[in-house]
Image (cartoon, rainbow, N blue to C red):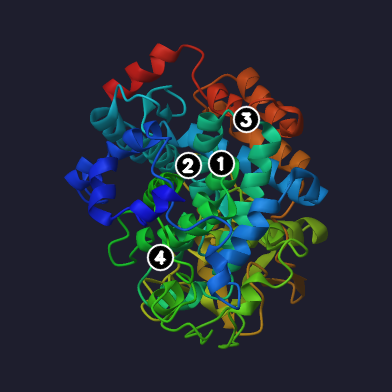
Amino acid sequence: MLAEKIEPQLGRRSFLRKSGLAAGGVASLAALAPFSSLAEEEQSTPRAIPQDNRQAATSTQSLSRQFARWIFGLRYEDLPSAVIDRAKGVTLQALTSALLGSQLPAGQEAVRLMLEEEAGVRGGATVMVNGARVTKGGAAFANSEMMLAGGKYDTFRMLTHPGTSIVPSALVAAEVQGASGREFVTGLAAGYEVMERMAADFIPTVMARGFHAGPVFGIFGAAVAAAKIMRFTENQITDTIGLCVNLAGGNLESAALREGAAARNAMLAVLLAKQGHPGGETALEGKAGFYHAYAGNNRGQLTYSFVGDTQTSMPKITTNLGKEWIFLETLYRIYSISGYNIAHIDVTAKLCEEHNIRYEDVDRVEAVVNWLETQYPSPAFPTRREDIGEAKPGSTRYYSAYGAVKRGFPLLPTGADPPEVLDLMKRVTIIPSHDMPLFAPRITIFTKDGKSYTKQATGREFIWDFSEEARRIREVIPGLPISGKRFEEIIATCLGLGQQERADRLTQLTLKENASAALADLAGA
């Protein structure tokens, strides 16, 4: 207490001077070094306000406080079996995507940047596939960018891909902390749940204001997962969330930085909170807080919504937290295409299979879909209209035709498009509807003999258990930079995370069997 009287609060200037952040802004490369220096300053000045007294000044718990209290108390034993299974599955999906993305220009560019700026850092974390050590933020950035490049990630309500920011940050935290598989799974589940609750009703509205909802909300999930794995206190988690409000970002017009930046900034928020930097108790719902800034108000008024209702509420965000898991709505985007198109492939394929419909039999196809799926990324400024204009490869009409012709879609790139697909896509009609749920098209195939066949999707076609995820994702093995045997080790380790002493074994398993080969490949790229 004497120290608190002498220095009641660590001032901004003294904090920046001590942490090494004064040399540059968050967005500059000069700010890369603090990720290392922050990690080394574990014995920092005590926080000014005692841990057990800060909330006493407010009568109602803030959203950040409610989240933090739940996160702090969450145990592996509290997690439903379905949540544990999904956490293992999304981890496998993200790792697979990073392996694929490590071979693609966007992933290699991110790794090269981090190696050029951060090679030789002390106390950092590992870049997947090549094994280089960079800062914690740098590793989260590079690994996230590889996951994005690989295209095999998860999807929540069309426009966010939680795993591309949460999984890389969680793996960095697990490596730094020496965390067990159970701690990793618990942190991952907390990160997904917080991010998706924050985002659920607000995604279309945030997008309509020009922000990309993926990184804007992704930073919170990434930071929460890392903070939980690093065993933060309730107050430290509250601060972490508040600091994320200052670091969240992502713009649709630019679209230049997405979840990689969110993962990197999440680690900055985590390390600042670890040093004792305050984040702001009501940073989410306050009058000038996150929701006011990104959604336009803090009253739950929406510009757009998936189902037409333009009013939600702040209390709904944390209602039944820990009892109802929105995390379980996360879909596997098994095909490297826009998430709203994945169901068109499988549902159309299944309809043809059930009724033995061949390409030669098809006269035309109709698909009734959620209206927002036809105006990407937002009705406020759509850059892609799926319901009008000419059908092109990569459009919803193309994927519906592909499902009908090939009864599936490849997980790895193939050669030229089948001519039958290019022909049939011209006879596919997309009908927008305000009544259809997301990812749940109603497909009707009209055959040349005058009959019609309809199948209504459930929206849950791409929600499955770990064993189905492992079965389906194995199709990418020929395209991986590691052996099939090593990939099977990754699958087994994900499945057995509950018994794994160290979760960062997953990162080590992504490394090429000949580690020097990875660096050579990168140098020659």
> Whole-Å distance between the Cαs marked 3 and 2?
18 Å
Which one is in front, 58 or 5?
A: 5
Quarter of image, res 152 = top right
Mark 4 or 2, nearer chain start:
2
Looking at the rendered image, the disc whose residue lies closer to the viewer, 1 or 3, is 3
Can residue 169 be spotted in the picture? yes
Q: Mark 3 points at which residue?
A: 503
Can residue 158 be spotted in the picture? no
Amino acid type of the residue tagged 3 in the rendering:
Ala
Amino acid type of the residue tagged 2 in the rendering:
Met
The reply to whether discs 1 and 2 touch (Cβ–Cβ < 8 Å) is yes
Mark 1 or 2, nearer chain start:
1
Determine the secondary structure under disc 2.
helix
Looking at the rendered image, the disc whose residue lies closer to the viewer, 3 or 4, is 3
> Whole-Å distance between the Cαs marked 1 and 2?
6 Å
Q: Name the residue under label 4.
A: 212
